[in-house]
């Protein structure tokens, strides 16, 4: 009886986190390096020149942790350090922070050029999934 329960917890926590963008974004695929550069706020435009508006969940949010580790191959604190360095040195700014996945969905759906991430159950037709190479 305990084994199915453990399996249920493992699958509930193992939801895929998808990279999502505003529907007006022409880019359909990004490499891990480009995605990492965008989320580190080093790359500020899409390949077609449109400004990227990056949205992230709080650094201590479980989905943020999974996204950074699984999709970007960096730890959340490494990303935070990069943002802090840019803000304090005056060379850049931190991404837009949202408090929840429903808020992330709403902001990406209504902000041209927006990029963020969501678990699959939060996806709807107001945003597009960007695949990663």
Image (cartoon, helix red, strand yellow):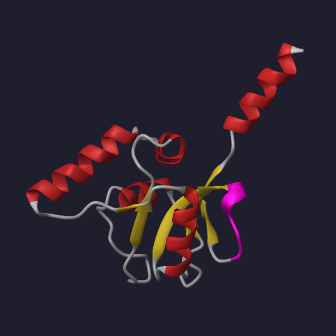
Confirm whether residue 19 shows in the render.
yes
Confirm whether residue 133 shows in the render.
no
Front-most of residues 10 and 32:
10
Q: In which quadrant of the rendered view does residue 39 lie? A: bottom left
Residue displayed at 9% across by 57% down: 89
Q: In which quadrant of the rendered view does residue 130 lie? A: bottom right
- Residue furthest to the top in view is 2
Front-most of residues 99 and 36:
99
The quadrant the C terminus occupies is bottom right
Residue 4 location (% of width, % of height): 86, 22
Q: Is residue 109 a member of the stretch shown in magenta? A: no
Residue displayed at 48% across by 46% down: 64
Q: Is residue 103 left or right of residue 86?
A: right
Residue displayed at 40% across by 38% down: 75
Number of numbered discs visible in the structure rendering:
0
Q: Which residues are magenta?
A: 120-125
**Placement of 3 over or under 112, stated as above or below:** above
Front-most of residues 114 and 35:
114
**Placement of 50 over or under 60, stated as above or below:** below
Residue displayed at 52% across by 56% down: 100
Residue 109 location (% of width, % of height): 56, 76
Q: Is residue 121 a member of the stretch shown in magenta? A: yes
Residue 19 location (% of width, % of height): 57, 60
**Placement of 131 over or under 25, stated as above or below:** above
- Residue furthest to the left in view is 89
Q: Is residue 68 left or right of residue 86?
A: right
């Amino acid at each position: 009886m305990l084994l199915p329960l453990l399996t249920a917890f493992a699958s509930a926590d193992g939801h895929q986190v998808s990279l999502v963008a505003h529907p007006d974004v022409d880019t359909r695929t990004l490499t891990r390096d480009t995605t990492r550069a965008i989320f580190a706020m080093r790359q500020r435009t899409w390949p077609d020149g449109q400004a990227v508006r990056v949205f992230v969940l709080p650094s201590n949010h479980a989905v943020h942790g999974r996204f950074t580790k699984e999709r970007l191959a960096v730890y959340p604190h490494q990303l935070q350090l990069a943002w802090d360095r840019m803000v304090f040195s005056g060379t850049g700014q931190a991404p837009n922070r949202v408090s929840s996945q429903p808020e992330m969905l709403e902001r990406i759906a209504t902000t041209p050029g927006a990029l963020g991430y969501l678990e699959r159950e939060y996806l709807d037709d107001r945003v597009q999934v960007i695949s990663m190479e």
